[in-house]
Image: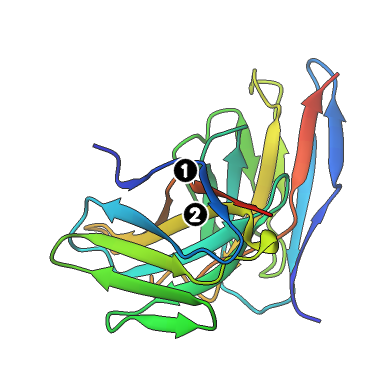
Amino acid sequence: RKEVEQDPGPFNVPEGATVAFNCTYSNSASQSFFWYRQDCRKEPKLLMSVYSSGNEDGRFTAQLNRASQYISLLIRDSKLSDSATYLCVVNMGDSSGTYKYIFGTGTRLKVLA
Amino acid sequence: DGGITQSPKYLFRKEGQNVTLSCEQNLNHDAMYWYRQDPGQGLRLIYYSQIVNDFQKGDIAEGYSVSREKKESFPLTVTSAQKNPTAFYLCASSIRSSGISPQHFGDGTRLSIL
């Protein structure tokens, strides 16, 4: 089983729709969680960190479910400019105290006019 | 403006040649990382450094080398031993590798074989 798994998509949604992505992780000791956005042939850009209580930033809401070991990203009122690949990142430590960022392969979103 | 600068944006390597990718950050971050991304795939960790003069191998270190002589700089050398170097290379940094802070990325270097 992969350490971090995402549905690759693509998710094709009309403008104005609400869309949600999930990301599951295998290590219950994972420390912190992030969502990044990556446009075609560009670097990943931090969209939001994911906090235990859930957090919202405008049209974007991130939630963490430690019991079921997944994080989610909800996008409301989708815009054409939201079309991108969304990467889930989980940070976990090992027995030596080293922390590693583990990336999912991303979920591709296409917002259609 | 603080950030991470990678250069060059595009790089071409001849057979048997070593090439060096530059990564500089002015964010005062302790930890720096190098990733490789192949089309349609996720990011894979090549090397990382938590502090000056120290670095560790990631998941795919073979054929690559790094140095960390200054806090701001973490250059990556792609050696001739790396037989399939064509990829998008991303440098990242974080405040430290404690697990709480997110990573920030440079805008990448595209390396191709001539």
Q: Residue furthest left?
A: A67
Q: For this view, does B108 lie left or right of residue A14?
A: right
- Alpha-carbon span between mark 2 and mark 1: 7 Å
Q: Quadrant of residue B29?
A: bottom right
Q: Can you give x and y, in whole percent of width and height, for residue B97 in the image? A: 44, 68
The residue located at (70%, 46%) in the rendering is: A40
The residue located at (52%, 55%) in the rendering is: A86
In the rendered image, the vertical position of residue B57 relative to residue B17, given as above or below: below
Frontmost residue, A33 versus A13: A13
Frontmost residue, B39 versus B89: B39
Q: Is residue A110 visible?
A: yes
In the rendered image, the vertical position of residue B70 relative to residue A1, given as above or below: below
Q: Is residue B67 visible?
A: no
Q: Earlier in the sequence, mark 2 or mark 1?
A: 2
Q: Can you give x and y, in whole percent of width and height, for residue A105 in the image? A: 47, 43
Q: For this view, does B101 lie left or right of residue A53?
A: right
User: How was the colour assigned to the protein in this rendering?
Assistant: rainbow
Mark 2, secondary structure of its residue:
strand
Q: Can you give x and y, in whole percent of width and height, for residue B63 in the image? A: 60, 28
Q: Which mark is residue A105?
A: 1
Check contact, mark 2 vs mark 1: CB within 8 A.
Answer: yes
